[in-house]
Image (cartoon, coloured by chain):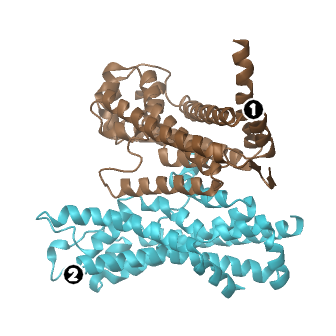
Amino acid sequence: MFRQELKRIFRSGNLYIALSAFLICLSASAAQIWFVYSSSEDVSFLSAMFLCFAPVFFGGTILLVPFCAAISCSQAQADEMTSGNVRFRVLRCGYFRYSAGKMCAGMLAGFVSLGGAFAIHTLIWHLAAGPYDPVNRPDTVLQFVEGTVYQYYLQQPWAYGAYLHAILGFGITGALWAAVSLLCAVLMMDAVLAAVLPVLLYYLWKTNFTDYLFGFSLPDFTGLYNDGVFWPDYWQALIAHFLLLVIVWIAYGIVLKRRIRNA
Amino acid sequence: MRKFLRQSAGTIIAGFSNLDSWVHSSRTWIMLAALYLLCMTNALRDERAVQLAIGSAASLNLGEIVFLQGFRGFNFGLSTMIFLVMMSTFPKRSAYQEYCMIRSDRRKWFHGQMIYAFIMCLLFMVLVILFTASFSAFHFPLSFEWGEFILSGEASFYLNLFIPNDFLTNMTPFAATLLVCLPTLLCWFSICMILMLSNLFDHPGAGIAAVAMLLISNYIFIQAQIPFYPLHYACSYYFYESNRIGDDTIRMLLFHLLVNGALYTVMRIRLWRMDIAAEGVQA
């Protein structure tokens, strides 16, 4: 089931549309910085490190995260629910294999669409602008706040740990939001809502609406790749993502079972 | 007059028969709830920003805060996305719609849809303003004059917005709000026209995909700080760099007139050649 689902997702265009949209948003922002500063004498912004991370921290790429993760996998799920095909598939492979296969493949699609896009973006700017090398190019040295996650990675050659950290961070975030979109797809049985609801939830979380309404803040969900994050915040964000994923998975299983029985 | 009213009745009925399926759609109610939360966070975020900056939110008044929200297009990207989802099935090609088209005529049916679309855009705009005002009313004093905080330019600094002087010197907050809402309203109407065009060509998904692509590309262009972006004259963004509001507003109106005129012409041509087919029924 998992293999079959993976084949379906990777053969459909949605995953590649999501990956391209995220990559274009990242690289277009970096290209603009590249064109502006390559003609000036100030070369401090022309390292792979800055061009890779500037679109994330200073651009608006963050808002595209749930949309790209959602469209990579939720459309097929919503189509299966509305067409009734889900019951035939469950009959063939069983409920547990179906739900686990669907969820794992969807999360992998979310991981690849965001993590893959960031990996390609890193590769492009690593080749175009040259690696982050403070010894040979001292004018491109970057400063992060003392004690933050990225400051730790700067000590490694080419700061490669920072790239891996961000790829993994985007991937995990993508996997979580892909799972949320699958839940929306089985809950609403509507392809449009399955793509849009995660974006709205994500935006509300980003604006810290729980603080306005109830007086407490949720952990920062950009903590897995953001630059101003300290290690305790990072672990807190990781645990929050894991807990949310477990809740979403359980809810997905319950709703799916209910839909199959009563649809 | 009575004859005119009788003739117009078919047009109005054809248009507003969409309302029933719109009200009974889950998309509508979920998006209305999302809109309510969006307006709440927009209003409370500004209140928090002003409070953090100068210690009291009372330096802005209700008229000003609604103007500031309208100036940002009420968070243009997200509010437009919500509107797009709510109107995504427009015009619903139900059997009753096709019946209306046969009983009146294609032209009347088409004009009815346009009237319906425009009234829905107006309704959505009124809802957005009401939601925003209802949250802000608890935190900001009721006044419809420009206050010292906004006139001195401090608001622009703290809220990271450039507010052209024409608004502050020549208009009241109410008039300025109406003006900044106009491009957003027309943009939503153009979206309805695109949805209708794709529906008349029997590809309803293409219209939604086209508008979604337009919104995403607009977002990417803005983030990449490319000087011109696809919806530059279609929404209130152009006020950000505007020094002559009058000229720019006329340019914006012309832009919408041209786009909607072109869409109208294509749809009129299509209408005469179109097969009348309801969902699952071919006539």
Q: Name the residue nearer the viewer: B84 or A187.
A: B84
Label number found at residue A133: 2
Q: Residue furthest right?
A: A262
Q: Name the residue nearer the viewer: B206 or A69.
A: B206
What color was chain B assigned in the picture?
Answer: brown
- Of circles 1 and 2, the one toward us is 1
Q: Between marks 1 and 2, how big is the CA–CA gap?
A: 74 Å
- Residue A38 in the image: x percent, y percent? 17, 67
- Residue type at mark 2: give it: Asp
Q: Chain of mark 1?
A: B
Identify which residue is drawn at 80% across, 56% down.
B280
Label number found at residue B104: 1
User: SS for tag 2?
Assistant: loop
Label 1: how many residues lie within 10 Å, few (<14), some (14-19) or many (20+)?
some
Q: Which quadrant of the rendered structure holds the N terminus of chain A?
A: bottom right
Label 1 in the same subunit as label 2: no
Identify which residue is drawn at 31% across, 37% down.
B162
Which corner quadrant of the image does residue A245 belong to? Answer: bottom right
- Residue type at mark 1: give it: Ser
